[in-house]
Amino acid sequence: MGTSVAQRGQTVAMGAEALLREHPDALVCGLAGNGLIVPVPQSVGLWGQDLIEGRALVDNVVAADRATVVKVWIRAQEEGAAADKVRLLRKPSTWMTLHFIDMREVHGVLLGVIIPSDELAEGQDAVEELAPAPPRFCSLEEDEGARVIACDEAFTEMFGYAVAELIGNSVLDQIHPEDQGRAVEGWLAVLSTGHDQQTRLRRRHKDGTYLWVDTTLRNLLNQPGRNCVAVEIIDVSAEMKAQEVLAEREELLRRLTAGMPVGLLHVDTDRNVVYNNARLLEILYGSHVPALTLGSEDATAPVASDAGATSAGALLQTLTEDSAAALEHALAAVLSEGVDRDVEVDITLPSGTWRRALMSLRALLRPSGEVSGAITCVLDITDSARARKELEHRATFDPLTQCYNRSSVLSTLEHELKRPDSAGTGVVYVDLDDFKPVNDRLGHAAGDELLVMVAERLRLASRDSDVAGRLGGDEFLVVLRDIPGAEEAMRAAQRICDALCDTFELSCATIELRASIGVACSGEQTPSSEELIKRADVAMYQCKERRECTPVLAGV
């Protein structure tokens, strides 16, 4: 009777132990049945050998020898052990002996052992030896103007720049053009809020290639001895590559979840939740996570629907109605067409707090190309959204009067004149008479106070559909939307005139104000915005000459 399977396993294990004792300089790794690297069990005795890290042992071998690795792998599973010569990427000029040993009967894993040698790989295809791997973590220090004031040695090794090429310069041009917008948003947010900002983006190596990195900005500008923004960078390029090549959905989600500052949601084609992480729940619910979501060890169990299935709609119930509709539209495209979509959503936490998140939806495909589901990365962008709104407000409104600024009111007029469905457009040009003496006599603070009061009266005297803007100094322009004729425009202008030719109670004095007002309408032949304003300006000067505080219509 032949040797039993157990006896064969013991024999192979003893042979492996002898091999390891004889070669303490070998490289070793544990392997699962699918060929992926797993931890070496403690039951396997090692004698100072270094461990092979990474996804699979074949990744460490030059491309020309990978077929050899596969053949040795198949033989080892048939015969219990097998060996052959291969070259490693780290030292392709020398042959090394690869052993695969099937120790599953005794230790639960297959063992990969690579034994170095001095045998040169002469006559083989030349393979360039790889440089030592650069570090995966580095840091910079930047001043308030985003200029580099210090960097560690790891940064220069990771990206190839000399220190002299960095100090005193901005590194924005080292960020991929598609990621620069998010980088700027993160910088503004960390300055305005003081909160740490985390962004995933691509940074350029000196050789022109890009690395995917996780960047954390820490505001230390007011800390004694630091006075900088600390930039911490982690190389995640390998992780990003893994997202593109891994086919197993659970493995993909697990890899993404570990240490990521974003929420994760994996749904199938029926919109049932396959997986979500704890960070997603923090974004959706804050500190008031419903008890139904805490059913698992790591607090990642999703909300269950009434029917007992896991429902994406139930999990995302804190999204506003409009945001839920936008997300559903994006998700439908991802699941039906296999495309990628990004959508910003508004969230109302159980506490009533508003929050905004960027949801990046990516289709998951089977080898056949069929969509099997979607994975969504959810990033809290509340701080950057607030900063963006503030920048948009500053770009649109006059900071003193809160009317539209010159650029915005002129853009509004341009738009109205081009509207094919407009009933007509008019403008009311307003100039305050004798405004300069107010500044000279009462001071600029009083002048500013008067301008604010004028703007408020302009808004009250105008229709809800009209737009009031400050052209500069003491000149204002009101765009009259859907004005069918001069008669209606003059009535609107008269209301404005009555509101401004009146008494104003300032904090330091009472003044009588007069305003010169010119009116112009588009008519049947639509003029340009410049022409319409010019006509109203001429009419305004006619009003100023008459000193009657009565609007003047252009051409009358």
Image (cartoon, rainbow, N blue to C red):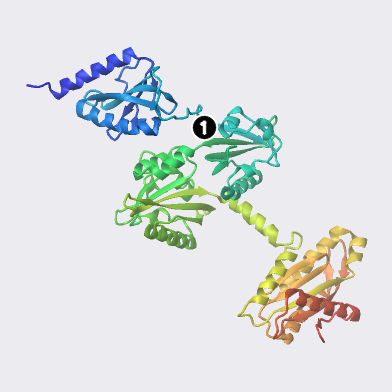
Q: Nearer the viewer, residue 456 or 373?
A: 373
Determine the image quadrant of residue 216.
top right
The image shows residue 165, relative to residue 6, as above or below, that is below
The answer to whether 9 appears left or right of 299 in the picture is left
Residue at 87% across, 77% down: 541
The answer to whether 437 appears left or right of 504 in the picture is right
Q: Nearer the viewer, residue 326 or 92?
A: 92
Q: Residues within 10 Å of mark 1 (few under 14, many from 20)?
A: some
Residue 154 location, x and y as percent?
58, 29
The image shows residue 446, relative to residue 109, as above or below, that is below
* Quarter of the image where the C terminus is located: bottom right
Q: Residue furthest top?
A: 22
Q: Which residue is mark 1?
A: 136
Q: Nearer the viewer, residue 504 or 540?
A: 540
Residue at 66% across, 31% down: 163
Residue at 38% across, 26% down: 87
The image shows residue 89, relative to residue 549, as above or below, that is above
* Quarter of the image where the N terminus is located: top left
Determine the image quadrant of residue 256.
top left
Residue 350, can we see it?
Answer: no
